[in-house]
């Protein structure tokens, strides 16, 4: 199986949101393998319109009508964007106070836009080979949180566990809910659904509302598939071979008795061989393997020390800061390596951070995320990129962009880092001791930071062990990095 990265839940100006569909697809194609751009379509049990609810009801209905009026054009544009290099899916969203919010996803370009009262009715009457995905599930029951009493895993085999709204894994999971829709409610978390015996896989998506699918730090999903084709990726989604990441593309392999993540298999033995491999993008903080939500194995990152034989390192260059709240600040960077080889470069690019419109916001900004962030070139000894940033909204809300380069070499390998004309030559050994930062001007300046290099013994872990357990069970894995980025790997179920 190969690993592909995507975002199946994000928005733009095709309903209430920002940015053109073309720009959204361009941004997705620049750094993702697959994508669905999701229009808001319906809210069957929308609150009754009165003086207090008028704005909420009106802007939703205007958005729904906009998608309905342009559905043929939207559907055609998404279908045309599907190529060998970039896979698209058709999708739109159903709000529901009773069921919680879901979006329908399908590889069928003939998906009709129809209005129904439940996810099951919507999927059945669409006539397509599709699924629905429940998202931001952790809100209050009856207040757009998931209704586990009405949940059907045959209709909704995937649950979006993290997005711009926060993380819905459990009451104590990272990234609590702070949107104006309310706090996280433990009755509507992923753990509660698993306690009830439901079988589903985990995905992450951005729920970005300004046309930037896969915007860094808001959520993404990985799918295990045989090839980068629509049919193969769709097979991976339907069979729950998925996992969620909050930002960094943490590579996770996880199996029990040879069965991949998302598998539902008969219980034939009380002995289970559990295997995992994790390759992070920063220092691993911990890896936890759970059986029935109880931790049975913990790999502690504090014990993962650099080794003399290590020959791979990751270097993160982060750009942003400053006071440019509206105007985009341009960045160009390059890494050159002597006595080593660049294996991979991971883009960590953000779009302007927007979640949903309010009464005072203009939703006509088609070019809001016409931001040409991309890796320009990569070879064995060089990688270059360009990106654009705006001011951080607050001291704890980053709008920075970054590139992570994995380099094969030794501590003597020479690395030349150039960002906006500022150039410094150093060695990997020196970067393992400390990173550095530089500013573009004397005060309230844009700046870039070269993080301390991480050795492969600090960002990779691999293990296999046996668990003795005679009863039905499910196993899943969670991975945390010291930079607060997480991965949540779909369970493997034994019945």
Image: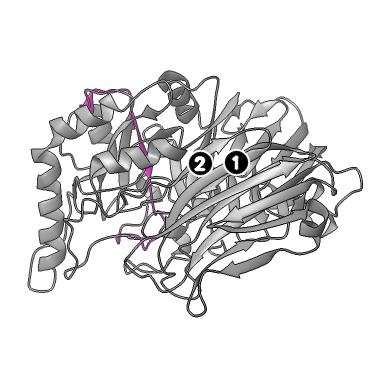
Horizontal side of residue 475 vs 270, given as left or right: left
Kindly state the secondary structure of the residue where label 1 is placed: strand
- Per the image, the residue denoted by label 1 is 383
Q: Residue 353's image quarter?
A: bottom left
Q: Is residue 1 magenta?
A: no
Mark with earlier residue (2, 1): 2
Q: Is residue 343 above or below residue 146?
A: above
Please say which color scheme the image uses: one colour
Horizontal side of residue 416 vs 63, given as left or right: right
Q: Position of residue 400 (x, y in %)?
A: 49, 61
Query: Gap in Å between the C-alphas at discs 2 and 1?
Result: 8 Å
Instruction: Confirm or deny contact between disc 2 and disc 1 (CB under 8 A).
Output: yes
- Per the image, the residue denoted by label 2 is 375
Q: How busy is the neighbourhood of tag 1: few (under 14 within 10 Å), some, or many (20 plus)?
A: many
Residue 163 visible, this orientation: no
Q: Is residue 57 above or below residue 79?
A: below
Quadrant of the image containing the N terminus: top right
Please give the range of residues in magenta: 125-143
Kindly state the secondary structure of the residue where label 2 is placed: strand
Horizontal side of residue 299 vs 12, given as left or right: right
Q: Quick one: 173 or 249, which is closer to the camera?
A: 249
Q: Is residue 139 magenta?
A: yes
Q: Quick one: 327 or 82, which is closer to the camera?
A: 327
Count of residue discs: 2
Magenta span: helix, strand or loop, mainly? loop
Q: Which mark is residue 182?
A: none
Q: Quick one: 419 or 162, which is closer to the camera?
A: 419
Q: Residue 118's image quarter?
A: top left
Residue 123 visible, this orientation: yes
Q: Residue at x 46, y 25 (%)?
A: 233
Q: Which residue is the extreme one toward the right?
A: 308
């Amino acid at each position: 199986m190969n690993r592909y990265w995507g975002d199946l839940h994000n928005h733009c100006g095709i309903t209430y949101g920002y940015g053109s569909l073309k720009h959204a697809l361009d941004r997705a194609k620049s750094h993702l393998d697959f994508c669905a751009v999701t229009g808001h379509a319906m809210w069957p049990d929308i609150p009754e319109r009165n003086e207090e609810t008028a704005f909420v009801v009106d802007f939703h209905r205007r958005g729904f009508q906009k998608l309905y009026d342009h559905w043929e054009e939207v559907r055609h544009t998404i279908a045309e964007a599907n190529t060998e290099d970039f896979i698209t899916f058709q999708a739109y969203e159903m709000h529901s106070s009773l069921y919680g919010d879901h979006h329908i996803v399908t590889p069928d370009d003939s998906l009709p836009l129809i209005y129904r009262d439940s996810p099951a009715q919507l999927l059945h009457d669409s006539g397509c080979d599709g699924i629905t995905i429940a998202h931001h599930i952790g809100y209050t029951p009856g207040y757009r949180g998931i209704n586990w009493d009405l949940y059907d895993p045959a209709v909704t085999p995937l649950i979006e566990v993290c997005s711009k709204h926060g993380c819905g894994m459990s009451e104590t999971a990272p990234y609590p809910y702070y949107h104006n829709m309310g706090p996280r409610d433990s009755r509507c978390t992923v753990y509660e659904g698993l306690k009830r015996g439901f079988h589903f896989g985990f995905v992450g998506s951005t729920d970005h509302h300004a046309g930037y699918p896969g915007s860094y730090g808001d959520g993404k999903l990985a799918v295990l598939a045989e090839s980068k084709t629509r049919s193969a990726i769709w097979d991976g989604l339907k069979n729950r071979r998925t996992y969620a990441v909050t930002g960094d593309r943490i590579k996770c392999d996880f199996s029990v008795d040879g069965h991949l993540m998302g598998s539902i298999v008969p219980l034939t033995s009380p002995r289970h061989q559990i295997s995992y491999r994790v390759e992070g993008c920063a220092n691993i903080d911990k890896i936890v393997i759970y059986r029935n939500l109880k931790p049975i194995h913990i790999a502690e990152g504090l014990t993962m020390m650099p080794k003399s034989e290590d020959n791979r390192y990751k270097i993160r260059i982060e750009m942003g800061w400053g006071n440019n709240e509206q105007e985009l600040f341009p960045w160009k960077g390059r890494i050159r390596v002597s006595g080593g080889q660049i294996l991979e470069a991971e883009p960590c690019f953000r779009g302007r951070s927007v979640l949903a419109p309010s009464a005072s916001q203009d939703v006509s900004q088609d070019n809001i995320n016409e931001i040409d962030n991309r890796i320009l070139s990569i070879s064995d000894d060089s990688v270059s990129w360009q990106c654009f940033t705006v001011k951080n909204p607050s001291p704890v809300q980053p709008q920075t962009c970054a590139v992570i380069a994995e380099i094969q070499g030794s501590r003597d390998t020479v690395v030349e880092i150039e960002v906006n004309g500022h150039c410094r030559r150093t060695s990997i050994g020196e970067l393992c001791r400390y990173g550095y930062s530089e500013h573009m001007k004397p005060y309230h300046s844009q700046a870039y930071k070269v993080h301390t290099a991480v050795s492969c013994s600090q960002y990779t872990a691999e293990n296999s062990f046996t668990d003795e357990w005679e009863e039905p069970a499910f196993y899943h894995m969670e991975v945390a990095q010291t930079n607060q980025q997480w991965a949540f790997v779909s369970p493997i179920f034994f019945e």
